[in-house]
Image (tube, helix red, strand yellow):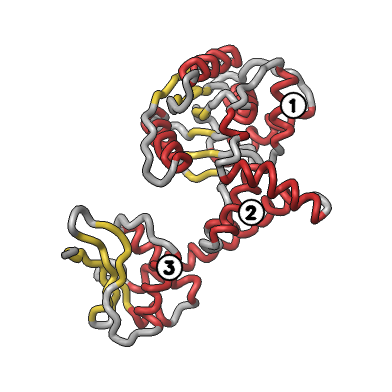
Amino acid sequence: MDQPGPRLAETPAVSALRQAVRRWLAEYAAGRSVGVALSGGADSTALTAAAVAEAGSVTALVVDHGLQSDSAAVAAQAAATARELGCVAARVLPVRVGRAGGPEAAARRARYAALDAARAGSPVLFGHTLDDQAESVLLGLGRGSGPRSIQGMRPFDPPWGRPLLAVRRTVTRQACADLGVTPYEDPHNSAPEFTRVRLRTEALPLLEQILGGGVAPALARTATQLQEDGAVLDAAAVELLTNAGAGAGLSVAVLAAAPPAVRRRTVRAWLRGAGVTASTDRHLRAVDRLVTDWHGQGPVAVGGAGTGARLVVARRHGRLALERAVVS
């Protein structure tokens, strides 16, 4: 078994981080080596220090997005800091960021792909904090894409772990100061062209002022409550999917007898199982109308199927069927 990492300054901030990581490891990854997605910023740097102290065997994975002229130097410094903190290894992962979906989404896809390829079977920890969770809930609310989007981030969405979702961003900054580590200040984190930055610097402070404080913790609690409710609905959807007979399409009669929330989750799970990962609320409601408001309408497009084709859901002989349709 891995030996405990180096001793850290026992300050309130450092202790809070260590306790959060210790709880996460005990629940999700006891006795396992872990990776940490290290950017060099305060959150991921503080997480790295706490993980080394609690997990023992920690590999830092530093993604270099190449979006700034000094990105290679920043990544190299982050890797050096990781080694100083006691990581068994620190790897810099250069990536190429595309353009599809905008800069934030493209960078995220490139980052997660690189981390997945480098993690060697271990879970990877992210330094997302309670403040990040609050921002995620607000984004979900603004986009109106349903309860799943305002559940925020989960503590463990294999292989990605987030031990600090109950820890404030001020605590990670204080921990870095207590440890004598100077974190990197990413200029993107203060660039107003990014939606999340404006939520952080404008929307949340205004809500705190209007509502008298406590907004970020309240939003994070909302995410946790919705995750708990969502787990119950997801379990019901799994049962309904089995009863509806997914192998040969879904029985319309079985689906129609279920509550709408469970029915739409079942359809979503069925589509995801067939490789359709981009279904939206609009898609799901259109498919739902094939069950509850059937008047002979045609198939519902739910995703691409290669050049010149698309995937559609059609109602055939009392069942929903996923088909490949040629686009003329």
Q: Is residue 220 above or below residue 303?
A: above
Q: Which amino acid type is shown beneath numbered disc 3?
A: Arg
Residue that appears at 71% across and 15% down: 180
- As drawn, the residue found furthest toward the bottom would be 295
Q: Nearer the viewer, mark 2 or mark 1?
A: 1
Which residue carries the number 1 mark?
174
How far from the left and from the top, in percent, is residue 324?
20, 64
Which corner quadrant of the image does residue 142 belong to? bottom right
Q: How many marks?
A: 3
Q: What SS does tag 3 mark?
A: helix
Q: Answer few, some or many: residues within 10 Å of disc 2's Cα (few below 14, many 20 plus, some between 14 and 19).
A: many
Q: Which amino acid type is shown beneath numbered disc 2?
A: Thr
Task: Name the quadrant of the C terminus.
Answer: bottom left
Which corner quadrant of the image does residue 239 belong to? bottom left
- Mark sitting earlier along the chain (2/1): 1
Which residue carries the number 3 mark?
282
Residue that appears at 53% across and 44% down: 156
**For the residues bearing labels 2 and 3, Cβ distance under 8 angstroms:** no
